[in-house]
Every structure is written in C-alpha cells, then in structure tokens.
Amino acid sequence: MISSPSIRAFHPSRGTMSIRPATLNDLYRILDLEQKTFTETAFSRATFLYYMHSDSSRVQVIEYEGVLAGYVVYTFRAEPLTVYVDSVAVRPEYRRQGMGRRMMDEVRDAAAGHGAQCIKLHVRASNERAIDFYIALGYERAGGVDSYYRDGEDACIMRLDLSD
C-alpha cells in the first residue's frame, strides 16, 4: 500500500498556502472547479469518488487563506513504477501565483519518495501555456495521441524522468 501524503503548509509573502489530501467535504468545490476548468471533458462525481477511495491514487487540494484554490489527482502505476497525473486545476483568480507549481512539486516528491521512475501526463496539444508550464518544471514532450480528447483534439504526452 502506498502511504498518503500529509498536510504541508507554505508561507508565501501574501498569505498561507497548504496542500492536503482531499476529503468528501471538498468534493463539491472540486467538482465545481473541474466543471469550470474542463467543461466538456470534466470528470464526474463518480470518477472523483473512485480516485478518492483508490489505494493507488491521490487527490490533493491546495488551500490559500482557507479557500480551495486548486487540486491535483495522480495515480501510481506499476511495472515500472510510474506516476500519472490524471487532472490538475487552479481557480482562475489564483493562477500564476505558484499554486500549480506547488502541487506539481508535491506530486514529484510523492513519486520520488515511492521510487517512481517517471511522471507522465497528457495535455491538449493546443494548450501551449500548460505545455510551457510543464517544460519549465523539467518535463519533456514524449509523443502524442491522436484524437485523445472527447472533442477529437490531440494530446501531447509530457514526461518527467526521476531516475537521475
């Protein structure tokens, strides 16, 4: 069994951020953010419940001054051990304040702490801002998938090697 991460607090100059495991009390706010962020490809309530109760997945939320500002969902996959980022979102009013980076750092730390060889994720091929964000975090383009999304858009696969 893979252990759950604990609450981690950060103290940026403008307030307090903390990352913690999501609870059922967070589900409504997570679903609201998911729907606003991904509209036509949003995960359902059942999907989030699956991730929240899975031994191999984690749903983490980031709070800023007590407000749920974002979340990340990631899954540990075996042979070889890889972490896959299933979903990550930050409320628009909290973007570009380091919260996405903090959540992705949390994923990297959890993956490395469990001996994962890499982290992978899919991002819309048209989402250059997100691709640039992942590249700035050390991810590399590792191929693509044609018509990956429900609306037919292609995905870019991003990969961060942790074996160094």
Image (cartoon, rainbow, N blue to C red):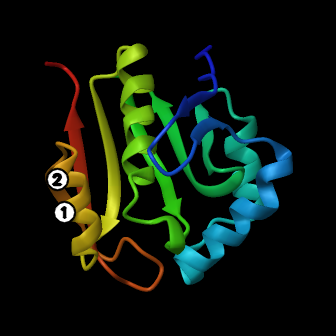
- Residue 162, percent across and down? 23, 25
Q: Amino acid at mark 1?
A: Asp
Residue occupying image coordinates x 61% and y 16%: 3
Per the image, the residue denoted by label 2 is 135
C-alpha separation, residue under disc 2 versus residue under disc 1: 5 Å
Circles 2 and 1, Cβ within 8 Å, touching? The answer is yes
In the foreground, 155 or 60: 60
- Quadrant for residue 55, please give it: top right
* Mark 2, secondary structure of its residue: helix
Residue occupying image coordinates x 86% and y 49%: 25
- Residue 105, percent across and down? 37, 36
- Quadrant for residue 6, please give it: top right
Vertical placement of residue 43 versus 63, above or below = below
Left or right for 147, reference 114: left
Vertical placement of residue 132 versus 140, above or below = below
Residue 78 visible to an observer of this rendering: no
Per the image, the residue denoted by label 1 is 132
Residue occupying image coordinates x 42% and y 42%: 102
